Image: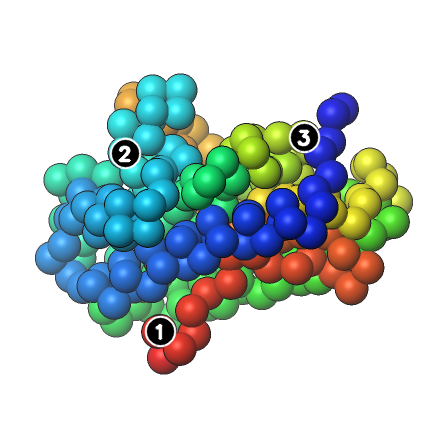
């Protein structure tokens, strides 16, 4: 396994790419209302990326046809923006990747469209908390399994399904680098995390099954039982104090 350790200058460049990702999320959240199509969200992302001198990490990746991923309700990841019109009560996971000056930033957030059900709101809160706990577990000289354990232990305590078939990844000059970051695990298993290792950590939880299937577009992954899914992700740098978030959300914009 060829993990790449970044120095402080490289981490700062990743943080700049992560800031672009945060700007995209802020713009989408401001505009997100019932009646928009998922293609409208992609257009917002395209414009912000262009304004910032960045390009999408996703567009053209293995033939992927859009700038972001938009996964609605029972869709977990890799949903392709298109003519689908968002309705009051939907939840939509927006996954954004940006390349700026040769470095990637990657973050996903799941948003409610208008007023959402208590069930959906609880799922979003739980998945965000699972992310927070996983980020805190990205501690130098701890095993990688600590991250997956943090997700799994919290999700089980909330009776959530944990999507095992997909997970996070190393990130830097490439969108996907070693290691793979599962959302399950044991804290005494996996590679030893080192200061400067950069990871995309991304728990995916459901209100039902952990089983998945892929739709006919060969991209969109959904829950096998049609239950709701949420996906939250940050790019972080491992440190002695835990994960340093490089895709920090712009609270001043979103409040």
How far from the left and from the top, in percent, is residue 231? 47, 50
Drawn side of residue 217 relative to residue 237, left or right: left
Residue, disc 2: 66
The first of marks 3 and 1 along the sequence is 3
How far from the left and from the top, in percent, is residue 197? 72, 43
How far from the left and from the top, in percent, is residue 90? 26, 57
Please name the residue shown 82% across and 52% down the image: 140
User: Can you tell which mark lies on residue 178?
Assistant: 3
The first of marks 2 and 3 along the sequence is 2
Drawn side of residue 151 relative to residue 210, left or right: right
Q: Secondary structure at mark 3?
A: strand
The first of marks 1 and 2 along the sequence is 2
Examine the rendered structure and indicate whether residue 249 appears above or below residue 85.
below
Q: Nearer the viewer, residue 132 or 15?
A: 15
Please name the residue shown 82% across and 36% down the image: 191
How far from the left and from the top, in percent, is residue 214? 39, 27
Please name the residue shown 82% across and 59% down the image: 240
Please name the residue shown 29% across and 23% down the image: 217
Drawn side of residue 119 relative to residue 113, left or right: right
Q: Give the distance between the C-alpha atoms of the residues marked 1 and 2, in whole angstroms.
A: 25 Å
Whether residue 53 is visible here, answered yes or no, is yes
Q: Quadrant of the C terminus?
A: bottom left
Q: Give the distance between the C-alpha atoms of the residues marked 3 and 1, in whole angstroms.
A: 33 Å
Residue, disc 1: 254
Task: State which quadrant residue 139 falls in.
Answer: bottom right
Q: Give the distance between the C-alpha atoms of the residues marked 2 and 3, in whole angstroms.
A: 25 Å
Q: How crowded is the residue under tag 1: few (<14 C-alpha within 10 Å), some, or many (20+)? A: few
Q: Secondary structure at mark 1?
A: helix
Q: Nearer the viewer, residue 92 or 107?
A: 107
Task: State which quadrant residue 193 falls in.
Answer: top right
């Amino acid at each position: 396994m060829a993990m790449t350790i970044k120095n402080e200058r490289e981490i700062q460049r990743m943080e700049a790419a992560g800031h672009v990702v945060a700007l995209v999320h802020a713009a989408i959240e401001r505009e997100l209302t019932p009646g928009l199509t998922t293609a409208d969200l992609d257009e917002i992302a395209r414009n912000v990326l262009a304004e910032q001198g960045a390009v999408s990490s996703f567009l053209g990746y293995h033939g992927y046809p859009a700038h972001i991923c938009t996964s609605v309700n029972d869709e977990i990841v890799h949903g392709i923006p298109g003519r689908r019109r968002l309705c009051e009560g939907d939840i939509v996971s927006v996954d954004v990747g940006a390349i700026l000056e040769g470095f990637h930033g990657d973050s996903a957030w799941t948003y409610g469209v208008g007023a959402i059900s208590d069930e959906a709101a609880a799922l979003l809160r739980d998945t965000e908390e699972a992310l927070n706990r996983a980020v805190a577990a990205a501690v130098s000289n701890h095993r990688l399994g600590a991250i997956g354990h943090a997700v799994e232990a919290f999700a089980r305590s909330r009776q959530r399904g944990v999507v095992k078939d997909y997970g996070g990844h190393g990130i830097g000059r490439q969108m996907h680098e070693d290691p793979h970051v599962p959302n399950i695990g044991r804290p005494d298993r996996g590679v030893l995390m080192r200061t400067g290792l950069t990871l995309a950590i991304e728990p995916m939880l459901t209100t039902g099954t952990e089983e998945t299937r892929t739709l006919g577009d060969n991209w969109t992954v959904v829950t096998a039982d049609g239950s709701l899914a949420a996906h939250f992700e940050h790019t972080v740098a491992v440190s002695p104090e835990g994960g340093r978030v490089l895709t920090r959300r712009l609270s001043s914009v979103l409040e």
